[in-house]
Amino acid sequence: MNAVVDSIESFGLLDGPGIRTVIFFSSCSLRCLYCHNPEMWEKKGTIFTKEQLLERILRNKPYFKKNGGVTLSGGEPLLQIDFIISLCKELKKEGISIAIDTCGVGIGRYEEILSYVDLVLFDVKYADAAGYQKLTGKSILESEKFIDALNKSKKPVWIRQVIVPGLMDSLDYLEKLSAYLKKFQKIEKIEFLPFHHLGFSKYEKLGIENPLVDTLEMNVSSCEELYQEFINHYYKK
Ligand code: SF4
């Protein structure tokens, strides 16, 4: 069984706790307006067997220490579900902690993959169905199936919300987000990630129209203020 991988970050510090090897699996069925990885939309990249990927991961194992481990990311790792379940079985035998960074839009077997995962980094796209459809081009319903399985699994979740000026930086949106997050039963952490332009050159290179080409970057301190406002006045556990 093979996987198609865009890239591997050996010592990531941003995608879960501790030092982590982050595997970016290729392909995604969403087309988020703010996507900064359009090169991962198609299933193109380096082919790895499970043994090859495991060997790469095990080289880094001494650095994982107490908190670190592996993060399955993408693109959307759930689209290569047979492979990631098989890989997770091996990682568990090695005692390696597993996180998955996902928008929850895969092709099923959610309960099974969640039984191996220690932490879910869930990418909220938009906190209501109409906005979700406009932002991603897809219905919100598949992600809700994943959230149901996540709640059944009782696994902890870190919520990640990209803040795009004009789309999510309003008090009205914070209200919607607060209502939306009630769906999750075990939130451990919430992160607001400011929209940036770092992926813009990729659109040009790939010849893909960039729908947010005229949208400003989200100011980092304004994003932090918005986050504090959300935590202090809107987010109800
Ligand atoms: S889910 Fe992630 S990789 Fe897929 S389009 Fe959205 S931002 Fe890009």
Image: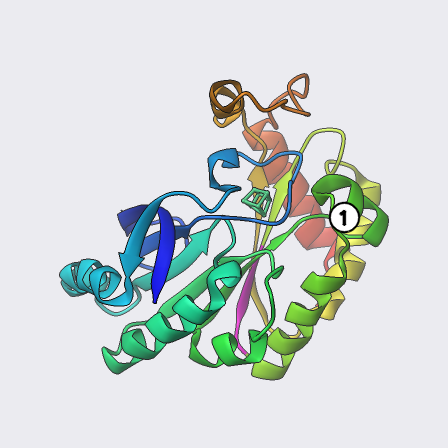
The residue located at (30%, 48%) in the rendering is 8
Question: Whole-percent x and y of residue 126?
Answer: 73, 48
Q: Which picture quadrant has residue 192? A: top right
Q: For the C terminus, give its image quadrant.
A: bottom right
**Most frequent secondary structure within the magenta stretch:** strand
Q: 81 above or below 210?
A: below
Q: Is residue 156 magenta?
A: yes
The residue located at (70%, 70%) in the rendering is 145
Q: Is residue 11 left or right of residue 199?
A: left
Which residue in the structure is indicated by mark 1? Answer: 132
Q: Is residue 163 magenta?
A: no
Question: Whole-percent x and y of residue 17?
Answer: 37, 60
User: Which residues make up the magenta segment?
Assistant: 155-159
Q: 34 above or below 109?
A: above
Q: Secondary structure at mark 1?
A: helix
The residue located at (53%, 72%) in the rendering is 156
Q: For the N terminus, give its image quadrant.
A: bottom left
Mark 1, Cα crowd under 10 Å, few <14 / some 14-19 / many 20+, is: some
Q: Quadrant of ligand 1?
A: top right
* 91 or 181: nearer the viewer: 91
In this picture the colour scheme is: rainbow
